[in-house]
Amino acid sequence: SSSGGFRALDCEAVKHYVAARPGLQQRVGPADSVESWSVREVGDGNINFVFIVEGPAGSLCVKQALPYVRCVGESWPLTQDRVRIESSALVEEAACCPDHVPAVYLYDKDMAIIAMRYLAPPFLILRRGLVAGAVYPRLAEHLAAFLAGTLFHTSLIKLDSTTFRQKVAQYENNEMCRLTEQVIFTEPYTAAKNNRWTSPQLDADVAELQSDVAARVAASELKGLFCGRPQALLHGDLHTGSIMVTDTETSVIDPEFAFYGPMAFDVGKILANLLLAYFASDGLEGAPGERDAQRAWLLSCFRDTWTGFAAAFSRLWSEHGSSGDLYPAGLTGPGAPCGGEVLAACQASFLAQLFHETVQFMGAFVIRRLVGIAHVADMDSISDADVRATCERRALRFGRRLLVEGSRGGLASIETLAEAAAAARAAST
Amino acid sequence: SSSGGFRALDCEAVKHYVAARPGLQQRVGPADSVESWSVREVGDGNINFVFIVEGPAGSLCVKQALPYVRCVGESWPLTQDRVRIESSALVEEAACCPDHVPAVYLYDKDMAIIAMRYLAPPFLILRRGLVAGAVYPRLAEHLAAFLAGTLFHTSLIKLDSTTFRQKVAQYENNEMCRLTEQVIFTEPYTAAKNNRWTSPQLDADVAELQSDVAARVAASELKGLFCGRPQALLHGDLHTGSIMVTDTETSVIDPEFAFYGPMAFDVGKILANLLLAYFASDGLEGAPGERDAQRAWLLSCFRDTWTGFAAAFSRLWSEHGSSGDLYPAGLTGPGAPCGGEVLAACQASFLAQLFHETVQFMGAFVIRRLVGIAHVADMDSISDADVRATCERRALRFGRRLLVEGSRGGLASIETLAEAAAAARAAST
Ligand SMILES: Nc1ncnc2c1ncn2[C@@H]1O[C@H](COP(=O)(O)OP(=O)(O)O)[C@@H](O)[C@H]1O
Ligand SMILES: Nc1ncnc2c1ncn2[C@@H]1O[C@H](COP(=O)(O)OP(=O)(O)O)[C@@H](O)[C@H]1O
Ligand SMILES: [Mg+2]
Ligand SMILES: [Mg+2]
Ligand SMILES: [Mg+2]
Ligand SMILES: [Mg+2]
Ligand SMILES: [Mg+2]
């Protein structure tokens, strides 16, 4: 079936699709080798189809979006415009951070297809590596570079306001944003039928959350920021399932939720997913203490991602900030009266606010993965429901504290936050 | 000269323009009366041309935008798309507050013309009435209704997020916003050649402002809010020169700067202009104390505008808030657990934040009218430069305090703010 030339592809059709486009075909193999190519569907996400094509000359990855949510079916329609967003965002992110984004080979609007570099093994989805117990010594450094580069270069600190407004309009991503509003900021705090949790173990915890006035006020404020704070081009879905890693490389995929929003959303999402891995680790180890080293690394990765991000962002700002309209050279440049002092004060104020919002978003992201529609493999891989519930309860309580307190109440720095996470993990529940 | 059918009209051409359009012509007089019609150009604003057409059946107002800034000339080009914005905003505001917005009769894109109701005398521009010493007992009530109605009904508290995003995109007003960024948030804090002030009296004050680190940091933060906080459809230029009044009526004109921005921008702008009238009053009275009654009224109008706005906004929210996506019924409605408590807490938190931002914007608006490119007749009408400088210095210092302290440091309520304004006016400088 087709509309405007669109049709859903299977493995065989993908092969012919690639073979018919010389720019793609050459990457896989000569025309007379097509019959020997292999094509596999590997999509493990909830939303789209992902095919890997391999041949004698090389490989590529073909991602196709159907006009609905894959894991639900045609009853949950979803705009294919998300492919335009994803391909534009991949290109824009690559301009900021070429080392951490797969190259795009082709965007086909009618077919809702992106062809891109195949991140072949040993590349692995980060979440799977974490569940298996691995550590990635360069991850924090790479995440910090990706966050700082993409968020800074698309912000008004770097851009003039005309370009900034054009980009905000270009990345309007209404349907995908509505999905986030619903499943992250609304449903977990209401009796929504999409919600699920480890039951009956967490029934009382969930009831408590859903009658928690402060938590619901804070979640509403975050939804307001999400919808009403275009600050930078966000990835929009930066969890550990959107990151592929090797021991030495890090590549961020799947920005179909990209839009102009609050920087704290991206920063908080990846930090929250590191915390979820941390709280799950007790349930995933064979013997108590087996994963102590991974846990220590997860906590330092959590800390170093923020610290490295803040440092890299400030560095970019000091180097390129005067090209943008938010802090022009006449105010913060070396030629302005006390320019250096004003710049330092602007940066300190900006990062303090960003940290505060990041902590709150982090709390919301932890909560939605325990109570809302979409859970994480980190917790779901814990087969004993009682053990899982213990891990989840610790995470849920900590998430609630982050959401409500933000960076107040003894959570004013990333160091105290990491210490508080360790204390929350050690809590008997 | 023309482009795409556009030509600039003079009084004679306006008469023929109206006569040729039956919908307009009938409002002024029968076809055979056209020769007897009178047409005057009354534009006293800086930007556009405004014609009043009167005849035996009635009158109307024709506003035309040339592709540049009127008071500067062709050397400062300005998009005629501002007329689309102005006519859409007038219609949208009228839907919220029909009593406080002139009816639009026609929008002509090609000719960059809006025809609207003529607000005939005794309607007078509010600023002129204030300079003349008048008081308007119902002004605060009307301003509160206009602010609450327009800001609430265009916000995400009232709208679903799809509609909200469509409106944000519809009201993109880049060139007009860039003007605001430049003349309000940047130039007053830098050695820009557009700046002017009462010199030499205020030379030292201006030098102090332009090397004031805290003021420049705060102004940059406000610029960030201005560019990056679509919260409601703003009027965008809500000073006392955009409001026409009689003893019993209030009508808001000239929303060509309308865009989706922070609510505090509109609220702060009108409050700042009331403060400017208050600080100017000493220089405008014939004998000391002559304007005591006007001053007392100005201060209570200042107070009551905020208080009335906050009350009206909360009332609209309680009545219509659950139709919007920001605080849906499932979270804050009567059926939700502790719904009433959550609603009250959300409102309190929202209004506290809005007040804080309003105070800061107020400070920036006071400052730009004393130091930047565009001054106010309130101060300019004080002919003695020393007397004027004294009034301006008091206002400037108070403005700086508002900008930097926001709602902290003893300015936490509208009452303490009004008291602080009175103290600042009484200060020897
Ligand atoms: N460029 C790529 N190289 C290798 N594997 C990929 C690539 N893109 C996606 N994948 C695989 O496909 C899975 C789903 O891709 P993703 O872009 O996350 O789709 P969805 O939008 O459905 O979540 C990923 O988890 C990963 O295993
Ligand atoms: N509808 C109206 N009725 C009566 N007078 C009006 C009307 N609209 C504008 N005017 C007069 O024209 C002047 C300029 O109008 P305005 O819309 O403020 O133009 P500008 O955009 O140039 O500032 C106003 O100050 C007022 O005196
Ligand atoms: Mg994915
Ligand atoms: Mg997701
Ligand atoms: Mg995806
Ligand atoms: Mg005007
Ligand atoms: Mg105007």
Image: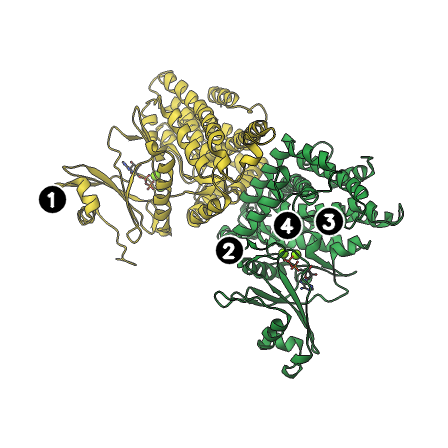
Chain colours: A green, B yellow
The span from disc 1 to disc 4 (Cα, nearest Å) is: 66 Å
Residue A223 found in image quarter:
top right
Front residue (pair A145, A207): A207
Residue A292, x across and y down, in percent: 86, 47
Judging by the rendered image, the residue that carries numbered circle 2 is A170
Circle number at residue B401:
none
Q: Are marks 1 and 4 in contact (CB under 8 Å)?
A: no
Residue found at the very far left of the displayed protein: B32
- Answer whether residue A342 is visible to the viewer in this image: no
Residue at figure coordinates x 20%, y 38% from the top left: B59
Secondary structure of residue under mark 3: helix
Circle number at residue A318:
4
Circle number at residue B35:
1
Which-is-in-front pick, marks 3 and 4? 3
Judging by the rendered image, the residue that carries numbered circle 3 is A305
Residue A118, x across and y down, in percent: 68, 67
For mark 1, name the chain: B
Secondary structure of residue under mark 2: helix
Q: Quadrant of the C terminus of chain A?
A: top right
